[in-house]
Structures are given as C-alpha cells and as structure tokens.
Amino acid sequence: MELYGERGFEQTTVAEIAERAGLTERTFFRYFADKREVLFGGSDEIKAVLVGAVADASASATPLEAVAAGLTALGAVMEERRGVEFARRRQRIIASNDELHERELIKLAGWSSALAGALHERGVDDSTASLAGEVGIAVFRAAFQRWIGEASGRRFEDVVAAAFGDLEGLGAPSAPSKSRQAAR
Amino acid sequence: MELYGERGFEQTTVAEIAERAGLTERTFFRYFADKREVLFGGSDEIKAVLVGAVADASASATPLEAVAAGLTALGAVMEERRGVEFARRRQRIIASNDELHERELIKLAGWSSALAGALHERGVDDSTASLAGEVGIAVFRAAFQRWIGEASGRRFEDVVAAAFGDLEGLGAPSAPSKSRQAAR
C-alpha cells in the first residue's frame, strides 16, 4: 500500500511489494491473486457481512433501517481491520488509476445488488428492494467521503448514521406532481 | 445497435456497423470517436442538461427537488431522442460486456458529481450536495430499471417522480441512535 502511494499503482511490481512486506513473490501470490487483491481483497466477505446484518435486523425494521444495520456492521469491520488511515491511502490510489476506479464502482454495484437481494429475502418487493439497495450505497459513498475527509476521528458507523439522518433534510419530492412542477 | 445485439459488442466491427447504417468507415469515424461512442455518445451533453435543470429549479426547491428537476429534464431528452426500446437494447448490450458496464458506472459517477456541483452552486454545502447527488443517481438507477422492465409505457419522468415518492416509504433511520439500534 505504501508503495502504491509512493510510486503509483502501475509502476509498482509484485516483487517490490513482496520485498517491502518481507515476503517472496511466491508467498505473496499465495495470499493475493494479483496486486489488485491488496486493494480489493475481502470484498466478498464484506458482501456477506452486509447480507448477514440485513437478514438479522429486527423484524420491524424498515428497508432502510435494515440497510443501515448492514452498513453499520460493515463499518465495524472497516474500523477493526484496517482503519481510516488505510482507507484514505487506498482511496488516493484508486482515484489515481482509472482501472482501479472502475473496479471500485463494480464492487459497489455488487454490494447494492447484495443489499437488494437480502431485502427481498425479508419480503420486500423487488422494486422497493432495488431502490433501497441503491440508496444504501449512495449513503455509503457519501459517508465514506466524509469519513476519510474529516479529522474528527468519528467512527464510520457514526458517520453512516448521521448521513442516514441527513436524508430527510434533502427534501425528497413527495408526490409525482410536485417533482414535475419543480422541473418547470 | 442492432448488430451489437445480434452478434455481441466485441464481435461487431466498425466496418459492419458502417455498412448497416449505409456509411463508409471514414464517415462513421467522423461521427463517433470509436464504436463505444454509439452507446455513450452525448453523455457530456446530458450532464449539461442535468446541471442546467438543477440551476434553473426554483429558488425554493429543496436539494432533492432540484435533483428531481435535473432527472426530469434528462428523462425528456431520453424519451425524445431514443426512447425506451433503444434503452432496453442498450442495457442488454452493456450488461453483457464488463468493459461497457464499467464505463456505464463511470458515466453515472460523473453525473453524480455534476449534480453535486450544481447543487453547490445553489449554495448547498458540499457534504449535503454530495449526498443528494448520490441519492439522485440511486433513484435514477432504480427508476431506469423499472422503466425498461415494465410494459406499461409510462414516461421516464413519471417513473422517476414515482421513485422519488417511494423514498419516504423506505423508512430512513431518522436519528443516529435509531440506526445503531437497528444493527443490534
């Protein structure tokens, strides 16, 4: 990770990463399928955390409350495993490389579908589940930017909770006629 | 477009596309930078439509009402220019090709930033503007899937308006303490 930051992702070889980590190349590849895995490893595991927490949310939870439970559980994993400094460095690397940026977006689209699927399992209709999954990832993305951008040291789950709280203040058009009117 | 559907995007050559359209290859390249442009051409123009409509929304519009105005204007362009049948075919092609899917996600991330930027110009603080931009694209994605998936022939702007109306029913956790509780 440090090396990606110092030299750029493309210029860093597996040999260099392995050397910095005190590993042989061979050992490196036993842990990571390729050098992108350092940035994207564990994504499927995180998907499972999201889905599990949505499934375990209380029966009375609304779709977005269940999604919030998923993102809270995800936040706990992010905090415990690697923390905000890792997230900051990772984000800088991803922002500097189109291919990594694309892979990040694909990953998030997969999480959105996973959330929608987990909501569907709770009996939420497909159309509502998809919308809630998309909104969940929208909140995640906005919260993630706030989290890595602020010096306050708030925990990720608190930033997520605040972002969900902010949704109401965005003033969603409540009726079709109203939103069409706003366009005129 | 027809050819992409019949043969797959990768297997279709520019020569074949040009022939079907009654153009020489040379003329084709005068209109489209490459064959992906057939699918992604006009994306910057659409970004300008979004930004313009957000800027023109009434002064009293909430952030999401302004975003809804942007998506309504975008919907009008989509309906007038190419319609739902084009959108359906395009989506099938994009779903079948990873590279195109990535480019689609990059495009949408760009729209989200454009919406946030336009809101910022209206005096909305950055953090709120980013959240509203992300939520706007979340609604767009969910509405788009509904629009191309249903046979009812509703106009895109009506589907968007309905999706915005559905946001409230998703039951956003209203206070940090509540969303944390839902996770337990």
Image (cartoon, coloured by chain):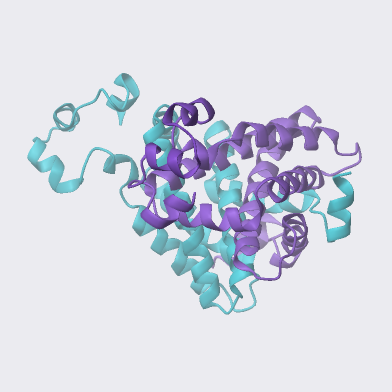
Chain colours: A cyan, B purple
Quarter of the image for the N terminus of chain A: give it: top left
Relative to A177, is A125 above or below? Answer: below
Relative to A86, is A170 above or below? Answer: below
Task: From the viewer's perspective, tell me whether residue B100 is left or right of residue A160.
Answer: left
Task: From the viewer's perspective, tell me whether residue A22 is left or right of residue A162.
Answer: left
**x and y percentages locating residue A47 in the rendered image:** 41, 59
> Which residue occupies 13% across, 32% down?
A22
Which of B30/B65 is in front?
A: B30
**x and y percentages locating residue B128 in the rendered image:** 71, 39
Which of A100/A182 is in front?
A: A182
> Which residue occupies 57% across, 63% down?
A67
Relative to B21, is B152 above or below? Answer: below
Q: Is residue A105 visible?
A: yes
Number of numbered callouts drawn: 0
- Residue placed farthest to the top in the image? A7
> Which residue occupies 91% across, 41% down?
B60
Which of A71/B29 is in front?
A: B29
**x and y percentages locating residue A65 in the rendered image:** 63, 65
Quarter where residue A120 is shown: bottom right
Q: Is residue B125 visible?
A: no
Quarter where residue B13 is shown: top left
**x and y percentages locating residue A127 in the rendered image:** 62, 69
Quarter of the image for the C terminus of chain A: give it: top right
